[in-house]
Image (cartoon, rainbow, N blue to C red):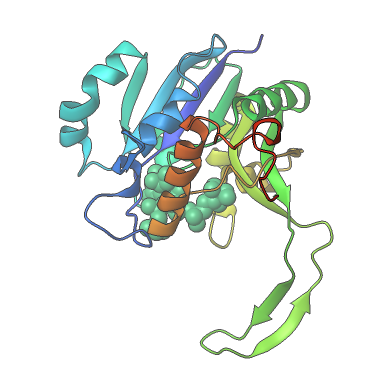
Amino acid sequence: MAQVAVIIPAAGRSTRFGGLEKKPFAPLDGRPVWQRSAELFWSRPDVTKVYLVVSPDDRDEFRQRFGHLLAFNNAQLVSGGAERFESVANALAVVPEEVELVAVHDAVRPLTPPALVDAVFAAAATHGAALLAVPLADTLKRVETGSTQVLETVPRGGLWQAQTPQVFCRDWLVDAYTRRTTLPGPITDDAQLVEAAGHPVHVVTGTALNFKITTQDDLALAETILRARNAKPVERPSRAFDDDAKW
Ligand SMILES: Nc1ccn([C@@H]2O[C@H](COP(=O)(O)OP(=O)(O)OP(=O)(O)O)[C@@H](O)[C@H]2O)c(=O)n1
Ligand SMILES: C[C@](O)(CO)[C@H](O)COP(=O)(O)O
């Protein structure tokens, strides 16, 4: 079984989320969002350690509120950077060399099914790099920036929406991060760097349930899903005992 270090970036600004509390720390059916995401990994026998990345501004408060959870679950706190890739780089720098695979999972994807974590870990062990992703289902429109006018409909064939976990053999991820300054344009996920470094990356079909909490609506949706999962099945009158029931 390949040994996996898990990096969980939680150092973003939560600009699109708004509200009083940053989204990784918002309560989700009784537990903070980041904790629900971390719980997907910290009891797995193949995970060596979880590296939780928070903003330097949040570090002291995080230690006070959640330090006991980290200690109990073999998790380590790391300071994040201004961009997501900098947060991941800071954690990657403290992952020991002997670890075979490194997984990166957004702190704000708390609903990943454990079977899909198994699947993407296995694919990365086989291919060297793999991520969860879903084929695009909607029709895509390109709209002129600053306008509402549609410029074109973009064919969606072959397009997949990237999710996390994204899992890489450590050497490839370190190589990709070492060369990141040569890559133009915004870097929005880790697979992008590994692809650009010339390493083959494979997709594993994910699920829409593995959505990223970006806005308050996403949090409300996640809450609804978790409550529905916890609820007892709805009891309906049985036809056998109610001959007059109109179905
Ligand atoms: N400098 C950053 C930026 C993002 N993240 C983390 O990367 C994940 C995905 O990022 P996103 O959803 O874009 O979060 P934010 O950057 O916080 O969102 P926004 O763009 O609305 O500010 C989140 O868990 C976020 O905390 C991070 O660790 N460090
Ligand atoms: C890594 C990611 O969640 C994959 O979909 C995504 O790219 C993060 O992007 P964001 O711009 O930080 O929301």
The answer to whether 90 is drawn above or below residue 218 in the figure is above
Residue 143 percent across, percent down from the top left: 63, 83
> Can you name the residue that lies furthest to the right here?
157
Q: Residue at x 79, y 65 (%)?
A: 156
The residue closer to the viewer here, 229 or 134, is: 229
Can the viewer see residue 93 in this picture?
Answer: no
In the displayed structure, does residue 198 sit left or right of residue 73? Answer: right
The image quarter in which residue 158 lies: bottom right
The residue closer to the viewer here, 246 or 177, is: 246
Q: Residue at x 41, y 50 (%)?
A: 219
In the displayed structure, does residue 20 sit left or right of residue 15? Answer: left
Residue 18 percent across, percent down from the top left: 30, 61
In the displayed structure, does residue 173 sit left or right of residue 11? Answer: right
Residue 172 percent across, percent down from the top left: 64, 31
The answer to whether 106 is drawn above or below residue 187 in the figure is above
Q: How many marks?
A: 0
Residue 53 percent across, percent down from the top left: 36, 35
Q: Residue at x 30, y 44 (%)?
A: 26
